[in-house]
Amino acid sequence: MKLEPLHAIPGVVASALVGPDGLPIEMYGEAGDALAAELASLRASLDRTGRRLGAGEVTRMAFTSERVEVVALSSGEFVLGAAMLRGSDTRAAQQALARLALDLTDLPKVDDA
């Protein structure tokens, strides 16, 4: 399981790895499926915004809501993210996500058919 290192980080309540088709490859936590769906949607919106602004590809995103803090990054065709209890230190999750992104090279490519 690719996301397993995130499970031990204090405050992580959900995590997800999303493929280029927007479907979850792996998820963790009660809200893992919702996180996966929203990460796919956010990536599409942020990619469009980056293109329109001429800013290039968005590779990291983070936001805070009333209850959670979400940190995510894209690596090639994939998006990895973690939802943490608000007020949690997100540095460990960000570092773990960066390490996990390096390991995504062994996942199969999705053909555009």
Image (spheres, rainbow, N blue to C red):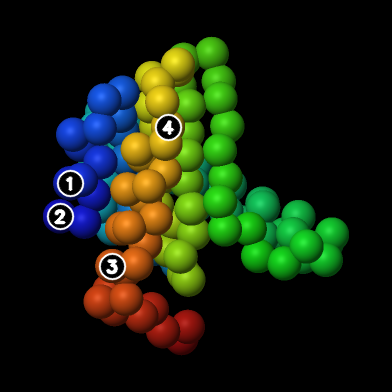
Q: CA distance from mark 4 to mark 3?
A: 20 Å
Name the residue nearer the viewer: 37 or 13: 13
Q: Does label 3 or label 2 sit earlier along the sequence?
A: 2
Name the residue nearer the viewer: 8 or 79: 8
Labels 4 and 1 touching (C-beta < 8 A):
no
How far across and how far down the image is residue 77, in percent?
Answer: 46, 69
User: Which residue is the site of mark 1?
Assistant: 4
The amino acid marked with disc number 1 is: Glu
Q: CA distance from mark 2 to mark 1?
A: 6 Å
Name the residue nearer the viewer: 44 or 73: 73
User: Which residue is the site of mark 3?
Assistant: 103
State the image quarter where residue 111 is shown: bottom left
> Residue at image x 32%, y 76%?
105
Q: Does label 2 or label 4 sit earlier along the sequence?
A: 2
The amino acid marked with disc number 4 is: Thr
Label 3 or label 2, whichever lies nearer to me, is: 3
User: For numbered disc 4, what is the local secondary structure?
Assistant: loop
Labels 2 and 1 touching (C-beta < 8 A):
yes
Is residue 92 in view from this perspective? yes
5 with respect to 55 (left or right): left
- Residue 90's disc is 4
